Image: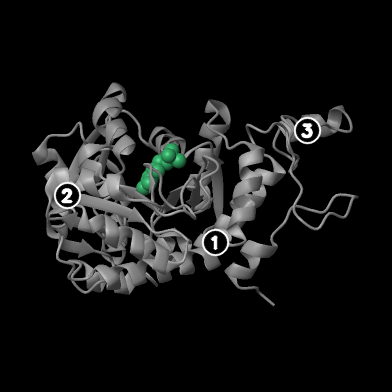
Amino acid sequence: MKQHPITQAVRIQTSRTSEMEHSTPLFLTSSFCFENAEEMRAAFAGENENNIYSRFSNPTVQEFIDKMCVLEGTEAGFATSSGMSAIFGCFMAFLNSSDHLLSCKSIFGSTHTIVTKYLHRWKIDYSYADINKPETWESLIRPNTKMIYVETPTNPGLDIVDMEWLGKLAKKHGIILLVDNCFATPILQKPAEYGADLILHSATKWLDGQGRVLGGIVVGREDLINELYLFCRNTGPSLSPFNAWILSKSLETLDVRIHRHCDNAEALVKALDGHGKLNWIKYPFHPSHPMYEIARKQMTRGGGLVTFDLKGGVEGGKKFMDALQMLSLTSNLGDTRSIASHPASSTHSKLSREEQESVGITPGLIRISVGLEHADDIIADIVQALEKS
Ligand SMILES: *Cc1c(COP(=O)(O)O)cnc(C)c1O
């Protein structure tokens, strides 16, 4: 009987060793041995499945990949040392000089830096479409457009891209569709169902979920993953077996954690709705979200991130942050511990006002990564800090 992906995320395991351990073993080894010269020859010729070297493959890393493939509903995957090495690896493995990349401005800051500051070194061109004007995207596609890259929901704007529409557009033009599924996780949405060819994650966020390690992963079509694998095994962005062991254990609780994060986020949104210190509150499953219908169509729940705009602007944002007693002031997200960030005075402070505006950042924007503390405590801390904003 075929097991549910949630069961497989708990149960998939590398073969037990002779010790008969219950929990999964950790293969902290840089290389693997061969019985004889013939076996070694065959391994290097690609004629057997033997592991050779942990830059290429490792059983603990493979266990993490196998679980992610089951969760995302994809054929194959490759795990990387961070989300950024997954993203850069995909750009370098698939984009040739004179190719064109179509994306939009509201992508993760370091991704935006790679696209705007580095891709031109390899004569790779790009265009940014307006995430809120889907009707304009097709006109930006060129004969040399090789890849479409999006995040949904976006960071920190929480904008939503209609994946069914985008999947069809990419297919019509024969373009690789790559989706950064970091914010939703496969528990809330599976981009492969809408035609995404490749899906990537910063495993550092919800997949680890406990703020311990950096990691990344790309899953998707087998032919593309093979190409990515050949590129990465030579260029070296591979995930360490130790981090893979942490991440694989984390996937056993992913479903439970994500649902509790959503419960707490929903409780927070309800408590803050219409609060006198706020201009607005944004959450994919709140009816006021501009893409509410699309979010409902492609996500099972709204996720663990909530944003709101303080009437007090930049100064109000800083006062709010200073008044928090429990929430952590840190730039990470997707942790058991609730986190507040104020992009205008921190992560995005180097951008001009217009640039901030174009990626959905207002002076008083606060992003909350809702944790696993009791909802009452999360709400109480935020409400008392709002009074001082
Ligand atoms: C954090 C993040 C990344 C980068 O991942 P790292 O693991 O920090 O390298 C990429 N995309 C999104 C949406 C992120 O939130």
Q: From mark 3 to mark 2, how far is it between C-alphas? A: 54 Å
Residue 269 x %, y %:
29, 68
Q: From mark 1 to mark 2, how far is it between C-alphas? A: 32 Å
Q: Which mark is residue 214?
A: none
Residue closest to the far left: 354
| Mark in the foreground, 1 or 2 | 2
Look at 58% across and 37% down and name the residue there.
Answer: 239
Kindly identify which residue carries mark 3.
Answer: 32
Answer with mark 1 or mark 3, whichever residue precedes in sequence: 3
Residue 107 x %, y %:
28, 45
Look at 40% across and 32% down and name the residue there.
Answer: 92
Look at 44% across and 53% down and name the residue there.
Answer: 334
Q: Say if mark 1 contacts mark 3, CB within 8 Å.
A: no
**Foreground pick, 81 / 104:** 81
**Foreground pick, 190 / 266:** 266
Q: Amino acid at mark 2?
A: Gly
Answer with mark 1 or mark 2, whichever residue precedes in sequence: 1
Which of the image's four quarters has the N terminus? bottom right
Q: Is residue 342 above or below residue 84?
A: below
Question: Relative to residue 285, is residue 229 drawn left or right?
Answer: right
Q: Which mark is residue 254?
A: 1
Residue 38 x %, y %:
85, 31
Kindly identify which residue carries mark 2.
Answer: 364
Asked whether residue 105 appears in the rendered view, the answer is no
| Mark 3, secondary structure of its residue | loop
Asked whether residue 133 appears in the rendered view, the answer is yes
Q: Is residue 58 above or below residue 163?
A: above
